[in-house]
Image: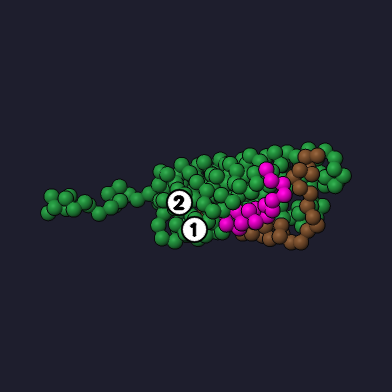
Chain colours: A brown, B green
Amino acid sequence: MTVSYRLLLAASGLLAIAGGGMHLTPMPPAPSVTTWSR
Amino acid sequence: MTADPAWVTGHALTAVSAVLLAAGLWALHRTGGSLPVRTARAVRVAAVAVSLYVVETLFHLAAVVDSDALAAGDLAPVAGTHVLLSAVLYPVSGVALALLGVALLRDGCGRRRGVALAAVLGGTLHAAAVPLVLLRPDADGAPLFAGGAVLLALWSLLTALTGVPTRRPIGTTAAPAPWVAQRIG
């Protein structure tokens, strides 16, 4: 059975918004990329 | 940052979203015979680029294992790999999605062109975000990351609703030129 590209893109968009929304929740200060490389 | 309880859930959703986006692009690629040539080519490139980007999202998610090392300022190999991959794969996938948007913009019409614009802008922001943060650590990359993510998510959702342009059957591409009509007449 072939899953429709429309179904896959819709699910992708919804999960991206849900995941992105969690990124936007208040978090403590993040270490910068330069901190990681030290 | 990686120690935040919402970090794993948020990044797991983002990783699954990227997997579904890659799968959606490959599914669209399989319908290639019905797509305009330019769009079909752009879909194939975007499918490859987003499939590679999936690897980055997995390392991004797995960077949580380096939480203690990051907090202590120690070597963080998984997080470091994520940063290295993101330096390459964010621009690659962003440019590929922006070019797909350009192809859809040129081949589409009506509201589909507006939807394609979201891929052009979102892909551009996505491509620029990591290079900006790496080259200018003091710069605030959050608007680029968030803007790119939101626009690409909107593009996915709206493309699911409106579909993509299809190749017109031969003979229905345009009305006959006036001189042809005259000769026929």
Residue B141 lies in magenta, yes or no? yes
To which residue does mark 1 refer? B115
Front residue (pair B76, B26): B76
Residue type of the residue flagged with mark 1: Val
Q: Decide: marks 2, 1 in contact (CB < 8 A)?
A: yes
Q: Which residues are magenta?
A: B135-152
Q: Chain letter for mark 2, please.
A: B
Front residue (pair B96, B140): B140
Front residue (pair B41, A6): B41
Picture coordinates of residue B177 (x, y %)?
A: 21, 51
Alpha-carbon span between mark 2 and mark 1: 9 Å
To which residue does mark 2 refer? B104
> Which residue occupies 49% across, 58% down?
B115
Picture coordinates of residue B38 (x, y %)?
A: 42, 44
**Local crowd size for mark 1, using a 10 Å CA cut-off: few (<14), some (14–19), many (≥20):** many
Give the residue furthest to the right. Answer: B72
The secondary structure type at the circle numbered 2 is helix
**Magenta highlight: main SS:** helix
The secondary structure type at the circle numbered 1 is helix
